[in-house]
Image (cartoon, rainbow, N blue to C red):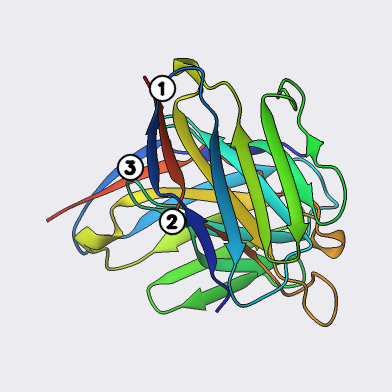
Amino acid sequence: GENVEQHPSTLSVQEGDSAVIKCTYSDSASNYFPWYKQELGKGPQLIIDIRSNVGEKKDQRIAVTLNKTAKHFSLHITETQPEDSAVYFCAASFSNTGNQFYFGTGTSLTVIP
Amino acid sequence: GAVVSQHPSWVICKSGTSVKIECRSLDFQATTMFWYRQFPKQSLMLMATSNEGSKATYEQGVEKDKFLINHASLTLSTLTVTSAHPEDSSFYICSARARAAQGFMNSPLHFGNGTRLTVT
């Protein structure tokens, strides 16, 4: 089955700096890679996703890059704000048949004002 | 966007009682829903996949008689923790995927807000 690894487990940045979270996956058949943000006591919320036919996707201060050859993808948050503080999870899935998602272990991001 | 509603958001029960958690897809049909369990500061652990109109598929190590799942309609799945014990205390989260016209190609996984279960 798929194995998703995520680094770092914790990350602290100064407000305004950038934050980068990296994930690797093992199954080359995976073709859909979402990122989720989970605030304390709440369920994960989708913040951005990328499919295997695209190398990069950007949505305002958030971007995701995908390297299919190396089987890794990254989340980039620029101009970080205190409200970006949360736990972020990456995931990999083979989306065509609605199969389950495989999640990374999470990154706790703290943005220091 | 697709919304998943989970209820209750928190529940406290006595050891030996059963607790039912509901998961509803509010504006889309979900033929498949997933139930996760999350321990503090840890990732999401898939417990079971709930399929509408058929038996749920449980992950290895998850007791199906302990965690009863019913997916009776395209918008509702329930998880019942039977004869709850303190070790069942956890954060339970459901999720669902909407089926797009092209199948699942353009539909991400949407999560409920979770249920905090405390068994005393």
- Residue on which disc 3 sits: A11
Compared to residue A23, the image places residue B81 above or below, namely above
Q: Which mark is residue B14?
A: 1
Describe the element under mark 3 as helix, strand or loop.
strand
Badge 2, how many Cα within 10 Å: few under 14, some, many 20+?
Answer: many
- Residue on which disc 2 sits: A37
Looking at the picture, which amino acid does disc 2 mark?
Lys
- Seen from the viewer's position, the closer of residues A73 and A105 is A105
The residue that appears at 24% across and 61% down in the rendered structure is A83
Compared to residue A19, the image places residue B49 above or below, namely above
Looking at the picture, which amino acid does disc 1 mark?
Lys
The residue that appears at 82% across and 83% down in the rendered structure is B101
Compared to residue B39, the image places residue B93 above or below, namely below
Indicate the position of residue B68 as horizontal and vertical percent values: 70, 35
Q: Quadrant of the C terminus of chain B?
A: top left
| Quadrant position of residue B24 | bottom right
The residue that appears at 85% across and 43% down in the rendered structure is B55
Q: Is residue A82 left or right of residue B30?
A: left
| Quadrant position of residue A113 | bottom left
Indicate the position of residue B57 as horizontal and vertical percent values: 82, 38
The residue that appears at 53% across and 22% down in the rendered structure is B84
Looking at the picture, which amino acid does disc 3 mark?
Leu
The earlier-in-sequence mark between 3 and 2 is 3
- Disc 3 chain ID: A
Q: CA distance from mark 1 to mark 3?
A: 38 Å
- Say whether marks 3 and 2 touch (CB < 8 Å): no
- Disc 1 chain ID: B
Badge 3, how many Cα within 10 Å: few under 14, some, many 20+?
Answer: some
Q: Which mark is residue B64?
A: none
In this view, the mark in front (1 or 3): 1
